[in-house]
Image: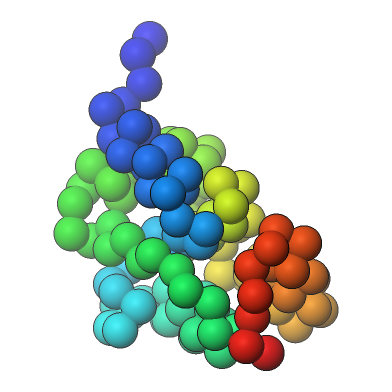
């Protein structure tokens, strides 16, 4: 079985950007509460990231779920590693684990 063509684009995104957030909407205008929470956390930390609007392309919407084997959006990747969705990101942020992970990966935060 061959993998979906979109996997190549997803691999390029997560290879070429330290932080990628697959989300509903854009970082400037999230279109769901869960995407807004993760974008807000990343903005509060002051880290640059690429937001990918899954609503703009059904292939990306379906493809990223298959790629990560994770059923929901948003999905956060840091230095090529899949972190999780809103609940995981929020819990990691609240505990300080997200900040530690970013530091360990060489990504400076404002917070």
Q: Is residue 53 visible?
A: yes
Q: Is residue 90 visible?
A: no
Q: Nearer the viewer, residue 88 or 16?
A: 16
Quadrant showing the C terminus: bottom right
The image position of residue 95, as x and y in percent, is: 81, 79
Q: Nearer the viewer, residue 36 or 72?
A: 36
Q: Residue furthest top?
A: 1
Instruction: Identify the residue at horizontal 35%, vertical 78% (top origin).
Output: 27
Instruction: Identify the residue at horizontal 77%, vertical 62% (top origin).
Output: 104
The colour mode here is rainbow
Q: Is residue 96 above or below residue 67?
A: below
* Quarter of the figure with residue 25: bottom left
Q: Nearer the viewer, residue 64 or 28?
A: 28
Q: How many marks?
A: 0
Q: Residue furthest left?
A: 56
Q: Is residue 62 above or below residue 46?
A: above
The image position of residue 51, as x and y in percent, is: 36, 66
Q: Is residue 6 above or below residue 39?
A: above
* Quarter of the figure with residue 93: bottom right
Image position of 96 (left or right of 21)? right
Instruction: Identify the residue at horizontal 18%, vertical 59% (top origin).
Output: 56
Q: Nearer the viewer, residue 47 or 66?
A: 47
Instruction: Identify the residue at horizontal 35%, vertical 14% (top origin).
Output: 2
The image position of residue 29, as x and y in percent, is: 28, 83
* Quarter of the figure with residue 28: bottom left
Quadrant showing the N terminus: top left
The image position of residue 49, as x and y in percent, is: 45, 69
């Amino acid at each position: 079985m061959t993998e979906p063509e979109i996997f190549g684009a997803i691999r390029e995104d997560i290879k070429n950007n330290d932080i990628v957030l697959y989300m509903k909407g854009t970082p400037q205008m999230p279109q769901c509460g869960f995407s807004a929470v993760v974008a807000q956390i990343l903005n509060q930390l002051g880290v640059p990231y690429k937001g990918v609007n899954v609503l703009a392309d059904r292939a990306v919407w379906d493809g990223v779920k298959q790629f990560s084997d994770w059923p929901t959006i948003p999905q956060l990747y840091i230095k090529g590693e899949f972190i999780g969705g809103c609940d995981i990101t929020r819990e990691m942020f609240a505990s300080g684990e997200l900040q530690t992970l970013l530091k360990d990966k060489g990504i400076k935060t404002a917070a």
